[in-house]
């Protein structure tokens, strides 16, 4: 499984995987191909299901595909059409899959919690409006991070907090911390100097947040 942006630990590393490196004698074989909508989202994969986000006309979509065939399983669509001069159209973040639910945030800040098997919406919140933030040119880019019973997101816009935690079950806001506008980076939960911390690279530098309260611990410009 590769259930979130950059994999299980957000390090882009899968341990104990052996690959056939002799692609001259045994090249990769294409299994299937299908057209997709625009966007910058990568895939989260759990079991036989692959989840991503894409722009289909005037709809910003979270899409579930069957991994082995490429068949579309379900689509959840929002009436959103975001574009920027450098990045073009479409969502920027990658969905996160946790305990049978998919957490996906769009370029305008719509955070959806969906049933992984059906795409049915469990709850939704506009993280920019909910945090009095105004979107900026490149849109909301950070992929959601699930930490225990919370899902962490970054209201990219100015005027709001850097990092916000929502309850996974209800969508209610738990805490908000930081004052720097976010950038393209996604938060990570890791150990620094023996202490578990939330790290976020924002437009002003690297900020460490307390995992229980969201309050900044230190900042490196």
Image: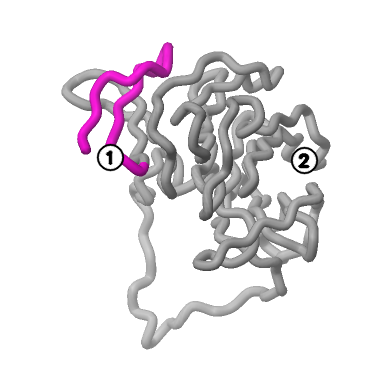
As drawn, 177 above or below 101:
above
The 10 Å Cα crowd at callout 1, few under 14, some 14 to 19, many 20 or more, is few
User: Which labelled disc corresponds to residue 117?
Assistant: 2
Q: Quadrant of residue 53?
A: bottom right
Q: Residue furthest bottom?
A: 24
Residue 197 position, x and y percent, is 32, 23
Q: Is 213 on the left or on the right of 39, as rendered? A: left
Q: Residue at x 66, y 36 (%)?
A: 111
Residue 130 on image: x %, y %:
64, 25
Q: Residues within 10 Å of mark 2 (few under 14, many from 20)?
A: few
Instruction: Look at the image and give the residue range highlighted in magenta.
Output: 203-221
Pick whichever, 171 or 10, lies toward us.
Answer: 171
Q: Residue at x 74, y 36 (%)?
A: 114
- Check disc 1 and report the residue beneath it: 205
Q: Residue at x 76, y 28 (%)?
A: 123
Classify residue 183 as left or right of residue 50.
left
Q: Is residue 202 above or below residue 42?
A: above
**Most foreground residue, 61 or 207:** 207
Nearer to us: label 2 or label 1: 1
Using the rendered view, name the quadrant where residue 174 is placed: top right
In the rendered structure, does residue 214 fall within the stretch colored magenta?
yes
Residue closest to the eye, 3 or 136: 136
């Amino acid at each position: 499984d590769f259930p979130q942006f950059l994999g299980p630990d957000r390090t882009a590393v899968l341990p104990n995987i052996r690959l056939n490196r002799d692609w001259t004698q045994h090249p990769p074989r294409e299994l299937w191909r299908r057209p997709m909508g625009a966007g910058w989202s990568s895939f989260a994969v759990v079991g036989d299901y692959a989840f991503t986000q894409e722009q289909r006309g005037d709809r910003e979509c979270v899409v579930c595909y069957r991994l082995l065939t490429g068949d579309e399983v379900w689509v959840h669509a929002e009436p959103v059409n975001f574009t920027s001069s450098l990045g073009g159209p479409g969502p920027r973040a990658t969905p996160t899959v946790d305990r049978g639910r998919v957490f996906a945030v769009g370029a305008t800040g719509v955070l959806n919690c969906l049933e992984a098997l059906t795409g049915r919406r469990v709850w939704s919140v506009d993280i920019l409006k909910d945090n009095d933030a105004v979107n900026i040119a490149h849109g909301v880019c950070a992929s959601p991070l699930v930490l225990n019973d919370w899902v962490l997101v970054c209201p990219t816009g100015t005027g709001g907090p850097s990092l916000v935690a929502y309850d996974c079950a209800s969508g209610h806001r738990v805490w908000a911390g930081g004052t720097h506008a976010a950038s393209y980076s996604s938060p990570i939960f890791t150990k620094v100097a023996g202490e578990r911390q939330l790290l976020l690279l924002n437009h002003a530098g690297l900020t460490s947040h307390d995992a229980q309260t969201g309050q900044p611990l230190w900042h490196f410009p």
